[in-house]
Amino acid sequence: MRRLRVLLVTAFALFSLFFGAGNLILPPQLGFKAGTEWWIVALGFALSAVFIPILGIRAHARLQGTMFDFATKVSPGFSLVYCFLVYAISISLPSPRTASVTHEMAIAPLFDISPLSTSFIYFTLVLIFALNRNKILDIIGKLMTPAILIILVVIIAIVTFTEPFDFGASTIESPLSYAILEGYQTFDAIGAVVVGGVIIVSINLKNNQTYEQKKRLIANAGWLAGITLFMVYTGLMLSAGLLHSSFSPDISRTDLLQQISLFALGNTGKGIFAILVGLACFTTAVGIVTGTADFVKSRFADSRKAYVITVIIGSLLGVLMGQLEVGYIIDVALPALMFIYPITIVLIVLNILPEKWTSELVFKAVVGVTILFSIPDFLQSLNLGYDLSAVNDLILFSSAQLGWLVPAFITFLATNLWKVYQAKRK
């Protein structure tokens, strides 16, 4: 019974650490635009926002270290640069975005308060939670996640059981690839390598378990959290698709989610919806700031001072960036995501595969090719006016901004075949 309780608490904590601003506002608009193809975007979104992140958690369960361990097979120097980039992006964009979403969707409709005041109060609370990190797993897993899930289930159930099962026409040209790229905006693959470390440190602080016990706990909790995420995403997409005729086609992401909640809960539900948004965003911000501080602490001989300073810096960045509009933060984040996300996905997959297929040579070659073929997608996302049509014609899936995928896979096969050839020659 105790093992089941620990599993549920850990899975709920993982769900909450993943389920933040992007996870709330992105799925409804996907379902709203996709119409009859809502199930296709659900699968595409799940691939990049559920499956890959949960693989990242399983990789953490296997490594049971920090994010630094994910890329050491490429080289320690590369791993350090990669970690720096990921943590810099995390505390500069997705973490502050949670405060921005909280203000626009939960605070501004109810109170006359400035975005700066909201982000200041918000990240003061994040600071308090992060400085008391030994209590994070219990507080998030036992209290916050059940509240989030109950509110979401009520909203989804009311819409799906009261609206006719009817959808509009899709306005998305390539629903699968579009949904995969939207899944990038959740930052969940990056979140997996960040918050996975938070879960491991929290478990180590609270439980005296063997390596195998912790590995099994983290892996099982990851799959349970992933299934829950998929069900919630699908429910939000389905709800928005069923309400296709109720709102303007050009409605914004945040307005759409607000209107769905008003439809389901009525005006009396505004306060409940504010609680949902606040909790969902807050848990993610705590996870990102804590994960960043844990990493910095590990680089400075487990210095508590390094941890505290990093938490303070992360909270200050959150205050400064969190007062910006949600749409602006999403636009700014895209180029960074187009560069770092493919590398993160490749590192997650390589760390989950058997070691006989993932030598240092394989890591170096696959990651190098991934970086090279991500450059056109990165340049295209900057909108600098480069004509990349010739590149799109030469590289498979490049038009869908997934040009790195096939070259990385071919490199993986080629390097492993080369290893087999070299072994036979000996």
Image: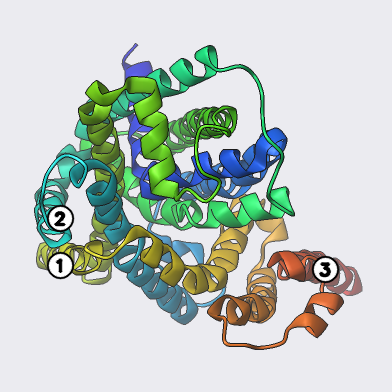
Q: Is the C terminus in the top left, top right, bottom left or bottom right quadrant?
A: bottom right
Q: Is residue 288 left or right of residue 343?
A: left
Element type at marker 2? Answer: helix
Residue 418 in sight here:
yes
| Residue 114 at x, y percent in the picture | 12, 58
Label 1–label 3 contact, CB within 8 A:
no
| Residue 226 at x, y percent in the picture | 51, 35
Q: Residue at x 63, y 50 (%)?
A: 179
Mark 1–mark 3 distance (CA, rounded to whole Å): 42 Å
- Residue ID for mark 1: 316
The type of colouring in the image is rainbow
Element type at marker 3? Answer: loop
Q: Nearer the viewer, residue 292 or 241?
A: 241
* Residue 123, label in figure: 2
Mark 1: which amino acid?
Leu
Q: Earlier in the sequence, mark 3 or mark 2?
A: 2
Q: Earlier in the sequence, mark 1 or mark 3?
A: 1
The answer to which quarter of the image holds residue 414 is bottom right
Label 1–label 2 contact, CB within 8 A:
yes
**Around disc 2, counting alpha carbons within 10 Å, would you say few (fewer than 14), some (14 to 19), or many (20 or more)?**
many
Vertically, is 234 above or below 255? above
Mark 2: which amino acid?
Phe
| Residue 94 at x, y percent in the picture | 36, 59
Element type at marker 1? Answer: helix
* Residue 396, label in figure: 3
Q: Residue at x 85, y 74 (%)?
A: 422
